[in-house]
Amino acid sequence: MWEFTSTACEKDDTTLIDQAFSIASQHDDINDLELLNEFCALAIQKNATNVLTHLIKQGASVKSLRPNDIAWRGPRSKPILEILLAHGWDINARDASRSDSVSEPFMWSVLMDIDLVTWCLEHGASVYPRDQEPLRDDILTMSQRKCQQVLEKAAYSATVATFELLRSKGAPLGWRPLHHAVETTTYHQADRGEETGRGEEEDKAAKESARKYEERMAMVRHLVDVVGIDVNAPGQPPGANLPECWGTPICYIANSYGLETDTRELAWFLLDRGADPTPALEIAKFTEHHKFVADVEAWRVKQADGRKCCAIQ
């Protein structure tokens, strides 16, 4: 049944979807309205505009759709989103009781697509999570832990252009934008140039990793040099001990042991901007991240050599 329904949605064929509904409605374990809504979710997933409109006319409701019902399994097309909005979908809806992606508004799920982010903002999306307390310096509420600020998530995966678009709308920085940017930079490898013995797929993956590395490094530089975030900024309020909060931004490099990426450029950038390596070195001892320790020592030698040159002059 579901395979036939999926085919109907892929072809965006209303005749086929009616046939699928007729077959499925013969089962007693689901009523017609529930079935319509299930079909509706599949039509959204497949970006089937004709089928979605047809199902809504038959009585399907999109008003109570959660963000992940729409964002699940791939990007949504603007025509699909326009249909949803026209029939009562709330673009800012979120389930504040949850601690996963359901607790985040829909726009949080499309931050890697600046075109869709722009569309969302033009169609009423807010940069503030609904029913969330204002940010404070002394506390991070449960609601804020469940749903991070949009700029924190943008720092993690979006481009600088998307970040600035959201910031221009008044989006707050949150607690850890630089921490997130540093962390995701460690996931990727800078371009190593041509390597012998590398197959086509490996070469493609290496180039994509290098592209992402440059994108994430651009975000780190932007947050420090343009936005002005302190390289020694704490990741949580004083006295808090929240999970997966490792300390200041540079600590996230020390905690990245095992990824086998070269983080020297990232570490040196933060050190050049005044990052204190002391807490990160403590983490590196625990994680046995010898490469990070060596990078810090090499930076210190470079600084000492620079001072000697200045003294001689």
Image (spheres, rainbow, N blue to C red):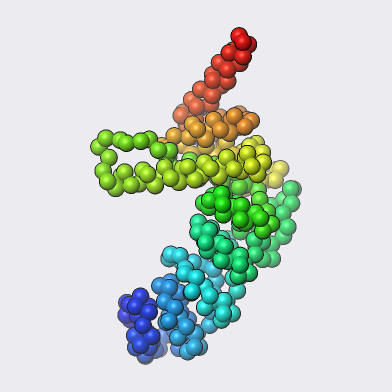
Quarter holding the C terminus? top right
Looking at the image, residue 75 lies above or below residue 255: below
**Residue 5 image position (x, y, % from top left):** 35, 80
**Residue 285 image position (x, y, % from top left):** 52, 30
Taking depth in this image into account, of 212 and 66 the one nearest to the observer is 212
Q: Is residue 142 visible?
A: no
**Residue 277 image position (x, y, % from top left):** 59, 30
Q: Which residue is at a point 53% across and 26% down the rendered structure image? A: 296
Taking depth in this image into account, of 55 and 117 the one nearest to the observer is 117
- In which quadrant of the rendered view does residue 117 lie? bottom right
Residue found at the very far front of the displayed protein:
313
Q: Which residue is at a point 53% across and 58% down the rendered structure image? A: 114
Q: Which residue is at a point 55% across and 71% down the rendered structure image? A: 66
Quarter holding the N terminus? bottom left
Looking at the image, residue 11 lies above or below residue 231: below
Looking at the image, residue 141 lies above or below residue 36: above
Looking at the image, residue 33 lies above or below residue 243: below
The tally of labels here is 0
**Residue 167 image position (x, y, % from top left):** 65, 54
Q: Is residue 194 visible?
A: yes
Give left or right: position of 278 versus 204: right
